[in-house]
Amino acid sequence: MIKIMIVDDERIERKSLRKTICDEYQENVEIKEAENGRTAIMIAEEFRPDIIFMDIKMPGINGIEAAQKIKNRNSDTKFIMVTAFDTFEYAREVMKIGVTEYLLKPSTQEEVLTSLESVMNEVNNSRNKRREEITLIDNYRRALSIVQSKVITSLLMGEIDEGGILDLQDGWEQDFEKTSFAMVFEFNKEEGDVKTFTDLIQRELEQSFYRSFIGTIGHNRLPVLIQLKRDERIDTHTIRRRALLCGRGIVASFRKRFPGNDVKIGIGTAYDEIESFVHSYHEAIYALTTSTSSNSIVYYSQVVRERTEANSYPYQLENRLLEAITTGEKEECIQLFDTYFYAIEKYCNHSLEGIKQKLTEFNIVLNRQMINIEQHFQTTNNYLHTTNLLELHQKTKEELLHVTQSIQSMYHTHKKDVIMITKEYMEKNYHKPITLEEVGEMVHLSPHYFSKMFKIRTGRSFIDYLTDIRVERAKELMHTHEKNIKEICYAVGYNDPNYFSRVFKKVTGFSPSEYRQEVLSSS
């Protein structure tokens, strides 16, 4: 169906044109009329015609002025200008607004239909092109959604290592490097449309959180990565409260929409690093397994707290102590060990032999981690010969502090530790491709361990630190016209100008061209 509007101050001309068009195209067109330019503008706003026969010479707003105003609001509208005056000035004016069809009064039926057929072909071609573009965009978005859901699922399940993450499409690593946690939805059966399930969950999540990435459903479980803004309040209590409120909303909507399909939700802890998101996923799965009731929401830390209160083993304390030792954090090691020792003392009901057994298990895990990070310090079993709790506490603490101190000293050779060496290397080589694997190998650390250590020591991720160096250097280069934006992009280590522009604006708040204009105008 083609929408046509006839604009002419002479009623007989409008009726004549309508008859000519209807006799030829019958039910394939919808026609409206307007007796002047002002009325035409008002009708076009709502009717949105594809083609307008516009008389040029009319009282008040003439045809050229009316066509210009309608064109400004709907650029797709095509015009056939009609006039009794064959002057070059009129032709030149209508060409300025992109009109190519021009009829002189009186026009024959053949002239009218020839002009109309030409413009109708333009309209149909534009529609077909638009349909192709929409189909292409829709297919691209669908494909991207499938790829993204598979990536998210692999990321949460630990099937992508850090090197694999860095090999993903430019910008994805930085997009993911925000405080995030996992939610896992478990359905009691697979009845219903999976897309309908995920759409409902996505809508609810969008109302509560900055971003959410939906994974792929499998074995009646759907993993989701929830991302928080950098400037959001992200303390554990706030995250837990928001997650539980959001979960309750999803359960309520789910029960209303799918009364025959119950849902349970497990929620993991929030982490700052990509490689730790898998922990949040496992925590969410663990939380799910602790619940036997349908339509429940279980937060991992709540489960851990309840188990701890029931005198369970302090696994989280153990992990934090292991991390403090292997990163050479002496002060933190002292504080954590005391807390850890008293926790296992309580867990073992103050049994000397029971505590020794747990410390032996701890040392086995520690020595294994030392091998993984290519360190050769090994703990001894001197504490096994102690005869009381006080002596056991003291000897074990001394041993672990010795290992921690040795690791710290090793990282400070010639008054330069590995972080300083890394920073200097990044300052000198920012214009080249730099990877975690390359730097980790240079300082004799595994990429995973080096990434964690860099974040602990600097408070920033490896990628964020490198990005800031590159952006600062780019800002320096923009103070002159010596290089254009593309050349600056390549000079600071990026190979995609569009990605460089996105990163630059994300860090500075300005696009590269806006920043250059600002600094040059103020100098």
Image (cartoon, grey):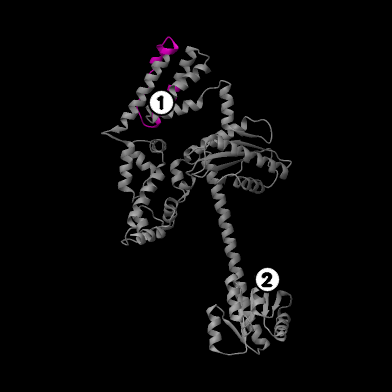
Identify the residue at the far left of this view: 414
Q: Residues within 10 Å of mark 1 (few under 14, many from 20)?
A: many
At which x and y percent is residue 424?
30, 43
Instruction: Tell me the SS state at disc 2.
Output: helix
Residue that numbered label 1 is attached to: 333
Toward the top, the furthest residue is 387
Tag 2: residue type? Phe
x, y (%) of residue 43? Answer: 68, 73
Which residue is rendered at x = 70% and y = 38% of the image?
A: 262
Is disc 1 placed on a helix, strand or loop? helix
253 lies left or right of 403: right
Image quadrant holding the N terminus, namely bottom right
Query: Residue 381: within the magenta?
Result: yes
Looking at the picture, which amino acid does disc 1 mark? Cys
Give the main secondary structure, helix, strand or loop, of the magenta stretch: helix
Position of residue 366 in the picture relative to residue 307 (left or right): left
Tell me if residue 489 is in the magenta stretch.
no
Q: Position of residue 201 (x, y in %)?
A: 63, 45
Q: Which residues are magenta?
A: 362-391
Q: Does residue 481 sit above or below 5 in this rendering?
A: above
From the image, tell me which residue sits under label 2: 47
Q: Earlier in the sequence, mark 2 or mark 1?
A: 2
Q: Quadrant of the C terminus?
A: bottom left
Residue 312 picture quarter? top right
The residue lying at 41 percent from left, 29 percent from top is: 324
